[in-house]
Image: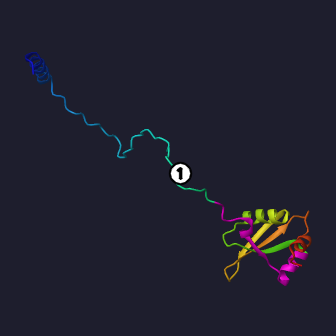
C-alpha cells in the first residue's frame, strides 16, 4: 500500500473511533401477535406442464344412467305419475341425473328423487314435466 492510502484509511478509522458508538435499536413490540411481513408474491411461470394430457370427465351420461328399472311398481309410476325409474351410478348427483336424462332422451325433468338400495345401488325417480309423457319415453327406450 502506498503511504497516502494508509493515511486516508487511518483517518477513516480515527473518525469512526471518535464518533459515538451506535447500538442497534430493538423494535418495540406493542402486540403479542407476530405478523409475517408482506413480501413480493410472484405468479408461477412453469417451464413445462405438470400433466401431459388434460384429464377427461369420468362421469359421462352413459355412466350416470346405467339401466331403467322394469318392475311392476316402476311401470305403475310410469303410467300413473309420469315418472321414469333408473338405476344410476352411486356417485351421481340429482343435477347430473337430470342433465343425463335430458341429453339421452330429450325430455325435461321436473324433479329427481334418489335413494340407495340395500344392495348398494342407487335408484333415481325422474319426474317428467307435463309437456312430456313418461309412457311415450318408455316406449322409445324399449322398457314397454
- The residue closer to the viewer here, 1 or 126, is 1
Magenta segment boundaries in residue numbering: 56-79
Which residue matches tag 1?
49
The residue sitting at 92% across, 71% down in the picture is: 136
Measured along the vertical axis of the image, is residue 19 above or below residue 105?
above
Which image quadrant is residue 123 in? bottom right
Element assignment for label 1: loop
Measured along the vertical axis of the image, is residue 108 above or below residue 70?
above
State left or right for residue 52 relative to residue 130.
left
Q: Position of residue 49 (x, y in %)?
A: 53, 51
Q: Position of residue 61 (x, y in %)?
A: 74, 65
The residue sitting at 29% across, 37% down in the picture is: 28
- The residue closer to the viewer here, 11 or 141, is 141
Measured along the vertical axis of the image, is residue 24 above or below residue 94?
above
Label 1 CA crowd tier, 10 Å (few <14, some 14–19, many 20+): few
Q: Residue furthest left?
A: 3
The residue sitting at 90% across, 65% down in the picture is: 132
- The residue closer to the viewer here, 21 or 109, is 109
Q: Position of residue 100 (x, y in %)?
A: 77, 64
Which image quadrant is residue 105 in? bottom right
- The residue closer to the viewer here, 144 or 121, is 144
Which image quadrant is residue 110 in? bottom right
State left or right for residue 125 relative to residue 16.
right
Is 66 contained in the magenta span?
yes
The image quadrant where one finds the C terminus is bottom right
Amino acid at each position: 500500500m502506498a503511504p497516502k492510502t494508509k493515511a486516508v484509511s487511518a483517518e477513516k478509522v480515527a473518525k469512526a473511533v471518535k464518533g459515538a458508538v451506535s447500538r442497534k435499536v430493538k423494535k418495540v413490540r406493542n402486540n403479542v401477535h407476530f405478523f409475517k411481513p408482506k413480501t413480493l408474491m410472484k405468479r408461477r411461470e412453469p417451464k413445462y406442464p405438470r400433466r401431459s394430457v388434460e384429464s377427461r370427465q369420468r362421469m359421462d351420461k352413459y355412466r350416470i344412467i346405467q339401466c331403467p328399472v322394469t318392475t311392476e311398481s316402476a311401470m305403475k309410476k310410469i303410467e300413473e305419475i309420469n315418472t321414469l325409474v333408473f338405476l344410476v351410478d352411486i356417485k351421481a348427483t340429482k343435477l347430473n341425473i337430470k342433465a343425463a336424462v335430458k341429453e339421452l332422451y330429450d325430455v325435461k325433468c321436473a324433479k329427481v328423487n334418489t335413494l340407495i338400495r340395500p344392495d348398494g345401488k342407487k335408484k333415481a325417480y325422474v319426474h317428467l314435466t307435463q309437456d312430456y309423457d313418461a309412457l311415450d319415453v318408455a316406449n322409445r327406450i324399449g322398457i314397454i
